[in-house]
Image: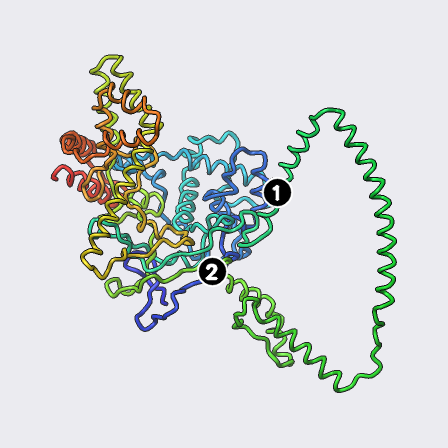
Amino acid sequence: MVIKPSTFGGVGVFLEPQDEEDDPLLLRIPKSNLLASKNSFIYNLLVEYQDGKDEGSLISGMYSLIIAVIYEVSIQHKSPWFDYLKSIDFKSSSTPICLWDEKDKQNLANTEIDLKNLLKYDEIIEFYIECIQFAHTYSHIVEIPDVLNISADSLTIETAFTKYHEKVLEFGQIIQSVISRAFKIDNFYDLALVPGADLFNHIDPVMSENKVVGRENIHFVCDAEVCETCGEDDCAHDEEDEDEEDEEENEDIEVDEEDASSETEDIDEDREDSEELKDSVSSSESSDEEEVDEEEQIQEEPEEVPITEITLEYIANMENELDCDSEAETVPEDGEVSTLSLSDDDNEDDQAEKSMSGANLDLAKELSDSSKCCDVVMMSLPTKEFGYEVFNSYGNEPNAYLLQRYGFITPKNVADSCLLSVQVFKHIKTLKSNISTEKVKQLEDKFDWFEAIGYDLINQLLDEEMHKDKKSCEKDTEDKNCEDTEAKGCEKDENCTDGCCDDHEDENEVPETWQLSPRIDFNGQCSPQTYIILKLIDLPYKIFKHKIVSVKKEKKLVQRVRELFISENNNEYNETIKKWCLQRLERYPTLVKSPNHKMIADLVSQEKSILKKFIES
């Protein structure tokens, strides 16, 4: 492997054809070497600081990793990750979009970033203030990092943003640097920076035969299901938790028994007294027997024979025993032979090597246990098209997410879509203004049902329909005797934690709320939820009341919902949706010169092309 400048920006990892190997494992990093909050020297302070607080933002998730990185950077060469952190150019890092210039934000109006409320900086400033307060709380133990070294007195969101704007921007660059490099590790470490694994550049998926196909060469894999308490794959904490639950259940049973009649308690006490007397007698007898047994054992054990003569035969036997012990220590328990060995020579030049053997053996043992490591695994070979650069995937994510998290966008991003939520809300508002109060109440009843029950149920039915069509398609393929009947791409690895397998899952993943479901996808198709919202609006209230609300049996409700909403007669609503697309297009502002003008122009152009695809269909 070669690390050199990449046409995709920064440096990349390249694997020349002659360097190709059969072993898919490119890189293995022990979890103990990760820069995670739990590995940081300030973790105990974070736990202490968080005690008594309702939220645990500073001891878990991305926030804990960010503040850990800030402190590790501040102690410079004293940090175990000094060389790694020195390789990160924090000052040249991009700034979070919520801290962008006001002209940039004006240009982003009506974009997916704006509609998803990603331009507000309140949350990031609140976190900044929390970090400052933490730094001042423990300033008598650890020196305050420069980026946090401002007065915490009467510090508000607005004063922090205006009075200490340069510090806020510096803090934002650190955040962006950490977020863009963080990997999801496991239940114990959560998020961490992984030296070496963050060198691989991202390559976006493509659309092939109306399906999203990933093009990454590697996957970041680690055992994510470990003990949350100690991080081990196999430990006794689960058993302890079960024992504690059993003890609690037993305590509850005992409390219930204590609430019985007083007569029963008196009888139990008499029985206990009688049993205690019997136990005391029997224990006395058993102790006497044990003493006799111990005396007999002592008498039976042979006395140690003193060494009266050191012979050559005796020395040879001792050397053989020592050699056996040494070999037993160097062979791992799982039977794998360690690549590290101890020198057989006893000269002075080998003493240093022998003194290092303990640490090396620990490292070898850790590397031999996959549950204690993170692996970068080759899934497909790099191609000449990209100069044999090895790519990772940051997931099948839209440009709004990529820009917020990683500071870049990709042209023709197949994960992009355009929301029509504003247009839907405006449509409903206009409708309410033209109907009676009673009709308004009926419309609100329908959407209350949709939010509480209907949206999840309908999404479940849509998912079933999609998989039914997929199975039917696969059957047709088999009937045609197609040799390649298996789905292309990798199956999602249960240990894959970097999101690289996301594009092999359902690319039609729906938002959590119905308000974000009206949209036009990259291919110019309207989401089925958009049509369903329009059908719900048009559904006569009497039919809604009789065929939906009054139904008690789940099976019958599913049948009615499928009949009323899951159907192919959607064309009658296309003109309304086209009108919404035109309204969305009209809301984009005229772009002005700004620091990120080019990137924003590309983003807007992509969104406009998606809307136009539906209009022209």
Q: Residue at x 34, y 43 (%)?
A: 404
Q: Which of marks 1 and 2 is in front?
A: 2
Image quadrant in which you'd find residue 308: bottom right
Q: Distance between the residues labelled 1 and 2?
A: 35 Å
- Which of the pair 521/403 is nearer the observer? 521
Q: Which amino acid does label 1 sit on?
A: His
Protein image colouring: rainbow
Nearer to me, 201 or 310: 310
Q: Position of residue 426 (x, y in %)?
A: 23, 24
Q: Where is residue 223 in the image (x, y as percent from the top left)?
A: 47, 54
Residue designated by label 1: 140
Residue 191 appears in the figure: yes
Q: Quadrant of the N terminus?
A: bottom left
Q: x and y percent of residue 340 in the render?
A: 54, 72
Quadrant position of the C terminus in the picture: top left
For the residue marked with disc 2, what is the amino acid?
Ile
Q: Look at the numbered disc 2 and give the secondary structure of its residue.
A: strand
Q: What element carries label 1?
A: loop
Give the numbered dot on residue 29. 2
Question: Residue at the location (42% across, 63% down)?
Answer: 27
Residue 247 placement, left or right of 145: right
Image location (x, y in percent) of residue 208: 21, 52
Where is 430 relative to 601, above or below? above
Front residue of 550/398: it is 550
Q: Residue at position x 19%, y 44% from top?
A: 523
Whether residue 110 appears in this view of the structure is no
For label 2, the crowd category at 10 Å Cα-Cα, with few meaning under 14, some 14 to 19 and many 20 or more, is many
